[in-house]
Image: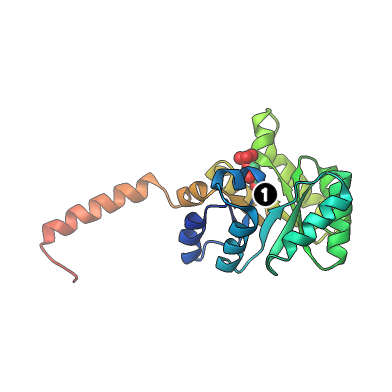
């Protein structure tokens, strides 16, 4: 399972990247706003830091403009994945850029039918949003499972990039289902290491070690 980190914060990406935890990065207009950085500058810095795909999202809504924006973003670095929303204009952009050999991430996916369209348009990644479905009392994880089944039924090669991940359980469930990639905020990825029994066990080992009066170094 690949881990993408869902942020445009360079320090947070670098910290996880140094540990080998970053197979790619996803950004979106909201994350660029949060970073306070210029999209072209910060995306270039991320691409220099990380070897894997770095998603950068177009903001136009008409296909011709989306394609032009996508081509401009693609020039930032060879590891750019142009991110487009799941609209007909986005699908047209996906098809055009994919045919040119460009990685494309189709985002804002909320149904199996949308995921089928993205695969047929040649998407490298499909990004179903788990948390936002959970937010409206639907089941985001069920969508991941359904897309996995349908893609496997037909041998679609588009990778399922489980997005809008809010909890560590979203990560576990995505792994069980067989999502190819998860993208999660740095805080969620760091929480994957937490377990109260690890903390309790370490406390007990350290307490006993102190009683031995020994030192290793
Ligand atoms: O990867 C998409 C992600 O940034 C959306 O997450 O938490 O805003 O729904 P969220």
Residue at the left extreme of this rendering: 213
Ligand 1 resides in the quarter of the picture at: top right
Q: Is residue 5 above or below residue 103?
A: above
Considering depth in this image, is 215 or 183 the residue closer to the camera?
A: 183
Say whether residue 134 is visible.
yes
Query: What is the quadrant of residue 30 in the picture?
Result: top right
Say whether residue 175 is visible.
no
Question: Percent from the top left, x then y, of residue 105?
Answer: 75, 55
Considering depth in this image, is 16 or 37 the residue closer to the camera?
A: 37
Coloring applied to the structure? rainbow
Question: Percent from the top left, x then y, of residue 195?
Answer: 40, 47
Q: Is residue 188 above or below residue 71?
A: above
Disc count in the image? Answer: 1
Question: Percent from the top left, x then y, of residue 119?
Answer: 84, 55
* Ligand 1 within 8 Å of the CB at mark 1: no
Q: Which residue is mark 1?
A: 162
In the image, taking residue 38 as reference, residue 193 lies left or right, namely left
Q: Is residue 152 above or below residue 86?
A: below
In the image, taking residue 174 as reference, residue 215 lies left or right, namely left
Residue located 67% across and 41% down the image:
130
In the image, taking residue 128 as reference, residue 48 lies left or right, namely left
Viewport quadrant of the C terminus: bottom left
Residue located 46% across and 48% down the image:
191
Residue located 69% across and 42% down the image:
129
Considering depth in this image, is 98 or 148 the residue closer to the camera?
A: 98
* Local SS, label 1: strand
Residue located 57% across and 52% down the image:
8
Query: What is the quadrant of residue 211 in the picture?
Result: bottom left
Question: Percent from the top left, x then y, of residue 214?
Answer: 13, 66
User: How busy is the neighbourhood of tag 1: few (under 14 within 10 Å), some, or many (20 plus)?
Assistant: many
Viewport quadrant of the N terminus: bottom right
């Amino acid at each position: 399972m690949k881990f993408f980190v869902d942020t445009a914060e360079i320090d947070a990406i670098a910290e996880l990247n140094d540990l080998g935890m970053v197979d790619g990065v996803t950004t979106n207009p909201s994350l660029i706003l949060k970073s306070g950085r210029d999209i072209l500058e910060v995306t270039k810095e991320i691409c220099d830091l990380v070897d894997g795909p770095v998603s950068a999202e177009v903001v136009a809504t008409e296909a011709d403009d989306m394609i032009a924006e996508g081509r401009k973003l693609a020039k930032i670095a060879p590891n750019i994945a142009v991110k487009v929303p799941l609209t007909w204009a986005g699908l047209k952009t996906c098809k055009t850029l994919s045919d040119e050999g460009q990685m494309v991430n189709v985002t804002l996916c909320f149904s199996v039918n949308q995921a089928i369209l993205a695969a047929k348009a040649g998407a490298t990644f499909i990004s179903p949003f788990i948390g936002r479905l959970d937010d409206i009392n639907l089941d985001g994880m069920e969508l991941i499972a359904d897309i996995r089944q349908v893609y496997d039924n037909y041998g679609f090669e588009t990778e399922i990039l489980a997005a809008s991940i809010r909890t560590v359980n979203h990560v576990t469930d995505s792994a069980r289902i067989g999502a190819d990639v998860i993208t999660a905020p740095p805080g969620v990825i760091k929480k994957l290491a937490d377990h109260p029994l690890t903390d309790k066990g370490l406390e007990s080992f350290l307490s006993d070690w102190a009683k031995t009066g020994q030192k290793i170094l």
